[in-house]
Amino acid sequence: MKKLLFTLFVASIFAACSTSDSENVAFVTLLGSDTLAVEQFQKTDSSITARVILRSPETRFSSYYLSWDETGGIKEMARTDYPTTSGFTGEGTLVQTVARDGDSLAVDVYSEDNPRSYKAPYEPGVLPFIDMVHWPFEVAFNNAVEADQDTVNQPFLTGNSISNFVIATIERDSMTIRHPFRGVMGVNVSANGDLEYLDAALTTRKLKVHRVDDLDMYALENRFVNNPVGELSGAVSVEYSFNDTDFQVEFGSPQKRDRELFGGIVPYSEVWRTGANRATHFSTSSDLRFGDLEVPAGDYTLFSIPEADGGMLIINSQTGQNGNSYDEERDLGRVPMEVSTQSETTEAFTITVEETDEGGRINLIWGETIYSSDFMID
């Protein structure tokens, strides 16, 4: 009964907010040339309702309702998912509710496989963090402008814990927001903090968010329903064997998506994680030599410093870490990379290990560019 009443309540709020006394705008989120998400939302002085089409890894239709308390934080929130066969015109299924309960947030997850209820911490001004969805950022920037401070710590509910994002005012119409581990995003805002444009080029996601007046969500349903973006940076594990030696490479594989790669989203002269997500792992069953660097049989992680004319491949002794966790003190060593070009375009970042007359070669291949380092097998 509680779930049914909450569903009816959210539906009535969404209908009420569709009238002319509320703001009706939209966001389009691009990752390179791909539309990653579209969001249409209506905002009042105390609540926001949103419809979202998210295209990664599969296409998903969801609606959200959020009302905030006197601190600007979560009072009540609900998420409803809709079947891809009918979209927003179909019967939605309530999948999550969040409600303030004193100094806690009561979270209910309605799942056939794993229904659960739990308490999450509450902090004044806390907002929901929804991966690849940006309407909560709009509320955060509105609150930051109202606070009228150079720097604001904005708490977001991530799972069952609180993560602090730092919002800094740069100029009257621009701010930055720092994700706790992905990096800093630049933002253009209106006088009251409405999000006009967000550029995450300096983060690991590198997406861009554009504000538009409105969207035909029903037309976009038909366009995107059977056309998902897929995994943003799928995990790849490959094995190679030659000269009585076994090699294994595990890496995250981001897509080109019509972006400028090396010298663009992968800056020159900076340490690159050499893939995405988890650090790139490399193992060899035999001792190797990269020039003067001896690499004993074992497990390592690979980082790199690309340059227009080559760069360096970094072999690091730490394993099991995320790609953001690079510890230079644990470098086994650095070896030169040669750079070459190919006529075809490799859409997904790829690492190969190939046999050569002298031993072997590690290749980092993305777009039309190939970085490579040769080794000998001892």
Image (spheres, helix red, strand yellow):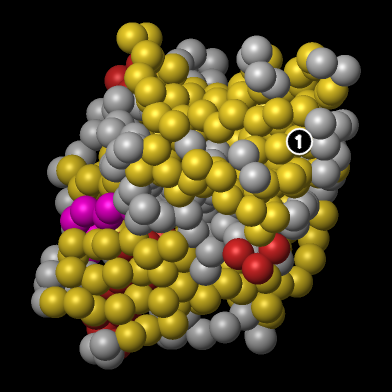
Residue 114 to residue 324: above or below: above
The residue where tag 1 is placed is 288
The foreground one among 247 and 120 is 247
Say which residue appears at 38% left-offset and 23% top-offset: 340
Residue 365 horizontal/vertical position (percent): 48, 25
The foreground one among 68 and 114 is 114
Whether residue 241 is visible to the viewer of this picture, yes or no, is yes
Quarter of the rendering containing residue 157: bottom right
Residue situated furthest top in the rendering: 343
Bounds of the magenta segment: 194-200
Name the amino acid type tagged 1: Leu
Say which residue appears at 18% left-offset and 43% top-offset: 212
Residue 64 horizontal/vertical position (percent): 48, 50
The foreground one among 95 and 138 is 138
Instruction: Indicate left or right for 121 with 87 as reference.
Output: right
Looking at the rendered structure, the secondary structure element under dot 1 is strand
Q: Is residue 197 magenta?
A: yes
SS assignment for the magenta stretch, majority: strand
